[in-house]
Image (spheres, grey):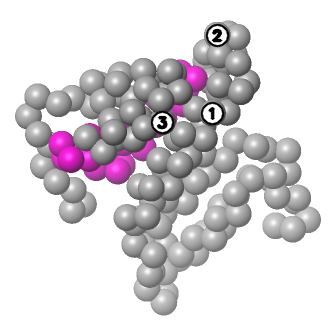
Amino acid sequence: HGEAEQAPGVTIDQVQEQFLDAVLTLREEEAARVMDAALASGFGWREIYLEVFVPTLVRVGDMWSRQELSVSAEHLITGIITRLLHRLSMTLPVSPMPNAPTALVGCVEGELHTVGGRMVADFLIAQGWRVWYLNGFLPTEHL
């Protein structure tokens, strides 16, 4: 995978806890520092996606559904994670081989939850796929 060796003593659970605290208090700069420190400690982008971002988004969704978070706070947190996803995705290869498989990834009309689709696209890109990412709320007839 080409990912650095993890520093001793740092666990992904600690990273997730620190990241969750940062986003729940809407401190984007702290969330970015936590992510950068995790990367510097040897955690790879895949671990950050699957073991930090995904559980954080699930927790935020649960809190929103219990009315413990406002819609605006949920949107702000999603925006923070989306921007950090973009930063990490900039390290992925963007030149697939000419015979690479192609994927079209997006969300149909009415679906505004695009983070999962973006993550799927990034995992495919990392595997050498050519990916056309269409984001969200795409009218079906335009697919």
Sequence-earlier tag: 2 or 3: 3
Name the residue beneath numbered marker 2.
68
Residue 61 image position (x, y, % from top left)? 62, 24
- Residue 128, position as x, y percentages in the image: 42, 73
Residue pictured at 70% horizontal, 63% vertical: 134
Residue 27 lies, in percent from the top left, at 47, 29
Tell me which corner region of the image, top left, top right, bottom left or bottom right, holds residue 141: bottom right
User: Depth-wise, is mark 2 or mark 3 nearer the camera?
Assistant: 3
Q: Residue at x 87, y 59 (%)?
A: 140
Disc 3: which residue: 28
Inter-mark Cα distance, 2 to 1: 14 Å
* Secondary structure of residue under mark 3: helix
Tell me the chief SS of the magenta region: helix
Alpha carbon of mark 2 to alpha carbon of mark 3: how far? 20 Å
The correct choice, above or below, for 110 with respect to 99 in the image is above
Residue 118 in the image: above or below residue 132? above
Q: Is residue 123 visible?
A: no
CB under 8 Å between callouts 2 and 3? Answer: no
The residue lying toward the viewer, choosing from 66 and 71, is 71
Q: Amino acid at mark 3?
A: Glu
For the residues bearing labels 2 and 1, Cβ distance under 8 angstroms:
no
Please state the extent of the stretch shown in magenta in the rendering: 38-60
User: Is 143 part of what is drawn in magenta?
Assistant: no
Magenta-colored stretch includes residue 53: yes
Neighbour tally class for label 3: few under 14, some 14-19, many 20 plus, Cα within 10 Å: many
Q: Nearer the viewer, residue 18 or 102?
A: 18
- Image quadrant of residue 18? top left
- Relative to 50, is 4 on the left or the right? left
| Residue 76 disc label | 1
**Mark 2 packing: few (<14 Cα in 10 Å), some, or many (20+)?**
few
Tag 1, which secondary structure?
Answer: helix
